Image (cartoon, rainbow, N blue to C red):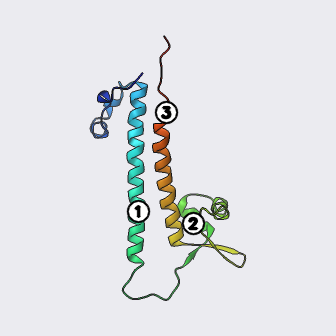
């Protein structure tokens, strides 16, 4: 059974009148959810890129700063990403989050944490979009 996309309200219409979703069929609700997830992923990606751009602009001052950027502990990174320190260490061991070892201590730079967050946001948006496209067509029993 194919969905008549004309009958699916736009996100603007739903934002203006949320009651429009009450009478929609299951496939129409799924199509609307896919639209919302796509928009949410695009917004999150744009926010992450804006953070990266703002960070790059701030990192290029007119005078050269000779002090190294402060390094973060796993606990500090965990608080920023809403994860546990153990999960942060696992991301570092897997090479997904860049880190540096100082003796027995593992530290993370602010820029590497921001880079990881932006990459994770882009990957999540890409995965949501690809999983929404691979849904099988729902067929009714005769």
Give 103 or 2, whichever is nearer the viewer.
Answer: 2
Instruction: Estimate the spatial distance between the alpha carbons at disc 1 and disc 3, rounded to whole Å.
Output: 29 Å
Which labelled disc corresponds to residue 21?
none
Against 6, is 131 above or below? Answer: below
Residue behind mark 2: 77
Q: Are marks 3 and 2 in contact (CB under 8 Å)?
A: no
Q: Could you say where residue 45 lies in the image, as x and y percent from the top left?
A: 42, 56
Q: Mark 3: few, some, or many residues within 10 Å (few <14, many ≥20)?
A: few
Against 122, is 5 above or below? Answer: above
Q: Is residue 13 left or right of residue 72?
A: left
Q: Residue at x 52, y 56 (%)?
A: 120
Disc 2 or disc 1, which is closer to the eye? 1
Q: Is residue 78 left or right of residue 46?
A: right
Q: Residue at x 42, y 67 (%)?
A: 52
Q: Earlier in the sequence, mark 2 or mark 1?
A: 1
Q: Residue at x 40, y 45 (%)?
A: 38
Instruction: Estimate the spatial distance between the alpha carbons at disc 3 and disc 2, rounded to whole Å.
Output: 36 Å
Q: Is residue 6 left or right of residue 43?
A: left
Residue behind mark 3: 135
Q: Residue at x 50, y 71 (%)?
A: 111
Q: Mark 1: few, some, or many residues within 10 Å (few <14, many ≥20)?
A: some
Q: Earlier in the sequence, mark 1 or mark 3?
A: 1
Instruction: Estimate the spatial distance between the alpha carbons at disc 2 and disc 1, rounded to whole Å.
Output: 19 Å
Residue behind mark 1: 49
Against 17, is 90 above or below? Answer: below
């Amino acid at each position: 059974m194919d969905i008549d996309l004309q009958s699916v309200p736009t996100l603007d219409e739903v934002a203006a009148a949320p009651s429009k979703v009450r009478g929609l069929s299951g496939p129409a609700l799924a199509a609307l959810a896919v639209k919302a997830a796509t928009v949410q992923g695009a917004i999150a990606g744009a926010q992450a890129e804006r953070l990266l751009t703002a960070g790059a602009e701030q990192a290029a001052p007119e005078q050269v700063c000779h002090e190294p950027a402060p390094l973060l502990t796993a606990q500090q990174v965990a608080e920023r990403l809403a994860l546990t320190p153990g999960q942060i260490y696992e991301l570092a061991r897997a090479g997904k989050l860049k880190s540096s070892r100082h003796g027995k201590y593992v530290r993370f730079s602010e820029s590497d944490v921001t880079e990881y967050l932006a990459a994770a946001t882009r990957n999540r948006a890409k995965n949501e979009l690809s999983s929404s496209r691979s849904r099988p067509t729902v067929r009714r029993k005769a």
